[in-house]
Amino acid sequence: MIKPLTLGYSPCPNDTFIFYALTHGKVAMPGYRFTERLEDVETLNQLALSAQLDLTKISYHALGHLREEYALLRSGGALGRGCGPLVIAPTASDMPSLRGKRIAVPGRLTTANLLLQLYGTGYDNLLVMPFDQIMPALKSGTANAGVIIHESRFTYRQAGFHEVLDLGAWWEADSGLPIPLGGILARRALGTETIRLVDRAIRLSLEYARQHPQEPRAYIRGHAQELDDQVTDAHIALYVNDFSLDLGAEGVTAVETLLARAEARSLIPKSRKPLFLD
């Protein structure tokens, strides 16, 4: 009997690169069938909050609200150095001057917003919108500053914006750890055996993409917001790394530290559930 599993991930190049082989029959997981759903990460966060997906990419901020129902997988996520969200503005500025100002964020439960709140107080006048609408909102004057992620990191300068703060660099300097951006979750109700099989299949899917980097290109291009191959390649190189294969001890420490700091600030609820089900 074939067991269906719903799988959510974003249309961003790092996710379509990782999940290409798994969703195109290049990696076998006998007895299971995946039905994928591609949505921006904040939509995935909200779908997970209502337990609509068996497996899903989420922001680590959202994980703080999902630990009772979902367990973290070790493969498939986005965690690293030099890849954090950026605070940008239409004119040269600094963070103190942005307190109380309207700041566009790519989702209330995104790690981008969590880092902004952990950085300091007074940055809670938020305009929540899809990540690709943030720079247009700054151009129109709808927001005074914005927190950008994904492809926007590579294009904001050409669009005429100024970097105010690299939140990832701030986190790395303050914690000494890589920045946990997004992870893959599995519903705890799936059970340990299924979750282990999925984790292994995601790792194999990424290994396949690394061995055949040109094969997923049409699939990636069909979903990317930014169609320039150079930007797409830079995006994958930045967000897909050895932590995507396996979080490892350092990656787990980074996730635990982020969640502990968020708990201490009452930005997420406390939980006694273990991160992993294995």
Image (spheres, rainbow, N blue to C red):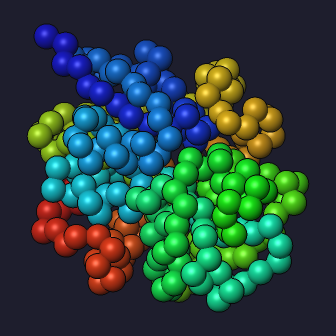
Q: Residue at x 26, y 60 (%)?
A: 65
Q: Is residue 40 above or below residue 259?
A: above
Q: Could you say where residue 133 lies in the image, as x and y percent from the top left?
A: 65, 48
Residue 87 percent coordinates (x, y): 66, 70
Front residue of 138 and 45:
138
Does 110 sit left or right of 187 as displayed?
right
Decide if residue 156 is in sight here.
yes
Residue 152 location in percent, x, y?
Answer: 71, 52
> For the point 85% across and 54% down, which residue is it?
159
Name the outermost residue toward the bottom. 96
Apparent side of residue 122 relative to residue 62 in the rendered image (left or right): right
The location of residue 108, given as percent across then percent down, is 44, 60
* Residue located at (29% from left, 70% from top): 268
Question: From what the image shows, is residue 200 above or below residue 46?
Answer: above
Q: From the viewer's perspective, is 82 left or right of 178?
A: right
> Can you see residue 184?
no
Check the image and report above or below for 47 versus 123. Answer: above
